[in-house]
Structure formats: C-alpha cells, structure tokens
Image (cartoon, coloured by chain):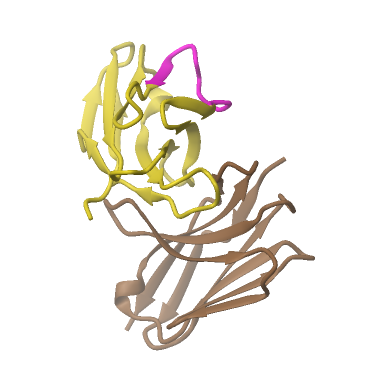
Chain colours: A brown, B yellow
C-alpha cells in the first residue's frame, strides 16, 4: 500500500547543513514533494522533484532522489534558526494529485 | 493573490455535537482537497473535488463526515456527530487542476472534541 516514512526529529547547529530523509512505497509516483510547516501555519511547498530526475537544486535546498531504493532526501545548506519547522515528505498517488504524507521531521536549529 | 481561506481557526465542541468548516479556495482553482492532520501525524486526504464533483472520498468516514462544493468554488466539511478521535487540524487545499500541480494549503481549523 501507500506509505511514506521519515525520521521524526533532527537537531543541527546554526550554519551547518541539515539532511532530512524519506522513504516511499508507490513506485508510480510522478512527483515527490517537500513541505514545510511552521507552528500554527498551513503547509508551504518548499520544492518538488519529478520522478525521472536524480537531483534538483534550488538556492539552499538540494533534493536527491534514488528511485531504485525509493529514497528521497532534502539537504538545507547553511541552516538558519528560521528553518526550524516540521518538514513533510509527500508522494503523489493515483494520478489525481492525491498526496500521501509522511509523519514529518521536526528540525531544531540551535546556536 | 489571496490564499486559501478557512474558518473558523479554532473550534471546541462536545462529543456527539455537530460542526462545520468552511473553505474558500484560490480563485480559478478547479481542485479542492480536505485533509485531516492528527497531532504528530502527517495530513491524510479525506476528500478531493474537481469543480463540484468528487474525485476521491475513499478515506472519508461517510457515516459521520460529509462535504460539499455545490457551485464548484467554496466548500464545507461537516462532522455529525463528532467523536473524541476527530480532534485534529482540518486543512483545506486547492490546486489549479488535478494533474500534478502545486497544492496551496490554508491555515487550517483546529478542532478539539471534549
């Protein structure tokens, strides 16, 4: 069935890189997404990658996709305190943009 | 461009009572989604509309939940009667079409059932 798994917590020092990992099960997913959720706010799309790509870079964000292992990662370079939030990995399923979310990784950035 | 609007932001009700949530999607967006996010979990799709038709309601508990999008714009989600396990944030999202385009989320309605 459809399932997305993430580690629940990550703590990094300000200025270091953060790497958040995700595994998914639906090999037919055409897009994979990273969303950010700050306290009391809705979900904000950070970036996405098409399934035939291996890597996508967008400013401080780098997404790596290993389709064979169904593994997705998000790297945030030069992590800042404003990056503290919950990060959700999601796959689209069923061809109708139905998003299947992981449980989220809480990123804590400390000085 | 205005975002997805939801109301109310917060609601506290007793179990067995009824509650309704309202969503106004981004203008021109044909696809509207309702997600349920239980504390500590990722959002789970309840129902997806394409204009005023239902595309997917496979995870909607139809004995107590209902949703409508009569004119293909605004939508309401109702719970009747509510149970304790319905306590969650209900997120509305919209996208231009149903085909792999970005979904924009509202701030959500936090429901507490006591």
Farthest residue toward the right? A68
Does residue B35 sit above or below A5 in this rendering? above
Q: Determine whether, in the image, residue A39 is placed left or right of residue A61.
A: left
Write the residue at 65% across / 41% down: A94
Return the x and y of residue B36 as percentages of the image width and height: 43, 36
Quick one: quadrant of the N terminus of chain A? Answer: top right
| Closest to the observer, B20 or B74 | B74
Return the x and y of residue A13 as percentages of the image width and height: 40, 83
Is A26 included in the stretch rendered in magenta? no
Image: magenta residue range: B57-67
Q: Determine whether, in the image, residue A107 is placed left or right of residue B59.
A: left
Write the residue at 50% across / 36% down: B45
Write the residue at 31% across / 32% down: B73
Write the residue at 60% across / 58% down: A31
Quick one: quadrant of the C terminus of chain A? Answer: bottom left
Q: Determine whether, in the image, residue B26 is placed left or right of residue B59.
A: left
| Closest to the observer, A100 or B48 | B48
Return the x and y of residue A92 as percentages of the image width and height: 59, 49
Farthest residue toward the front? B28
Which quadrant of the figure has residue A107? bottom left
Return the x and y of residue A42 as percentages of the image width and height: 32, 51
């Amino acid at each position: 069935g459809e399932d997305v798994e993430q580690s629940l917590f990550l703590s990094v020092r300000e200025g270091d890189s953060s790497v958040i990992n995700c595994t998914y099960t639906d090999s037919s997913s055409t897009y994979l997404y990273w969303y950010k959720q700050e306290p009391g706010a809705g979900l904000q799309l950070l970036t996405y990658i098409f399934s035939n790509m291996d890597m996508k870079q967008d400013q401080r964000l780098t997404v790596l996709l290993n389709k064979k292992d169904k593994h997705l990662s998000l790297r945030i370079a030069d992590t800042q305190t404003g990056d503290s939030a919950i990060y959700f990995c999601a796959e689209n399923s069923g061809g109708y943009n139905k998003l299947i979310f992981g449980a989220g990784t809480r990123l804590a950035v400390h000085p | 461009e205005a975002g997805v609007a939801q109301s109310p932001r917060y609601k506290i009700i007793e179990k067995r009572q009824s509650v309704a949530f309202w969503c106004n999607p981004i203008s021109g967006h044909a696809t509207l989604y309702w997600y349920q996010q239980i504390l500590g979990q990722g959002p789970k799709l309840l129902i997806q509309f394409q204009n005023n038709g239902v595309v997917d309601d496979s995870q909607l508990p139809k004995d107590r939940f209902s949703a409508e999008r009569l004119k293909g714009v605004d939508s309401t989600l109702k719970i009747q009667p509510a149970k304790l396990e319905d306590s969650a944030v209900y997120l509305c999202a919209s996208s231009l079409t149903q085909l792999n385009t970005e979904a924009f989320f509202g701030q959500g309605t936090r429901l507490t059932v006591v």
